[in-house]
Image (spheres, rainbow, N blue to C red):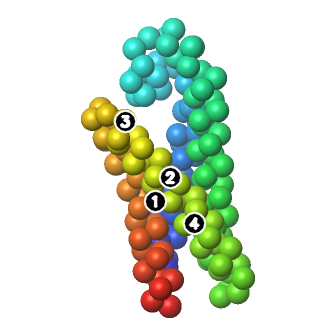
Amino acid sequence: MILVSLLFAFLAAALHVYIFTMESFTWTSPATWKRFGLSSQADAETTKPLAYNQGFYNLFLAIGAFIGVGCVAFGAGGPGQVVGWTLIFSCCGSMLLAAAVLALSGRKYLRAAVTQGTTPLLAVVLGLLAVTAG
């Protein structure tokens, strides 16, 4: 169960790196701004600073989750395991809560929220099961 939790945490982090690249680097390309529901190039230009900032939030959560996965995978049962699970629960939990906020923002965001929230949900739930069972 630990391995599966780590896999989902890794996938959640990878998705957030992808979101980071869209929000921070390709925001003003039509393919990206249309994916985020913007209606014009002008809207993309106007919201570019906000998207850039939000992208870095996603990157920092991803980095924390990646480090957590590494600490659990290579911590050999010591303090690294505690640090790793703390980072996974904190970062993936934040990803999950952000997906919940997105879902509550309107029906048009439901698909994105499910996409964004499924892997961190599985990482947290399976991680809690693994930690409490062991």
Asked if labels 3 and 1 touch by Cβ distance under 8 angstroms, the answer is no
Above-or-below relation of 91 to 78: above
User: At 52% across and 17% down in the image, what residue appears?
Assistant: 44
Asked if labels 4 and 3 touch by Cβ distance under 8 angstroms, the answer is no
Of the numbered discs in the image, which one, if any, rests on residue 95? 2
- Label 3 to label 2: alpha-carbon separation: 15 Å
Q: Which residue is mark 4?
A: 88
Asked if labels 2 and 3 touch by Cβ distance under 8 angstroms, the answer is no
Circle 3: residue type = Ser
Asked if labels 1 and 2 touch by Cβ distance under 8 angstroms, the answer is yes
Circle 1: residue type = Pro
Chain-order first, disc 2 or disc 1? 2
- Label 4 to label 1: alpha-carbon separation: 9 Å
Of the numbered discs in the image, which one, if any, rests on residue 75? none
- Label 2 to label 1: alpha-carbon separation: 6 Å
Circle 4: residue type = Ile
Q: Which residue is mark 3?
A: 105
- Label 4 to label 2: alpha-carbon separation: 10 Å
Q: Which residue is mark 1?
A: 120
User: At 51% across and 83% down in the image, what residue appears?
Assistant: 131
Q: Quadrant of the N terminus?
A: bottom left
Above-or-below relation of 95 to 4: above
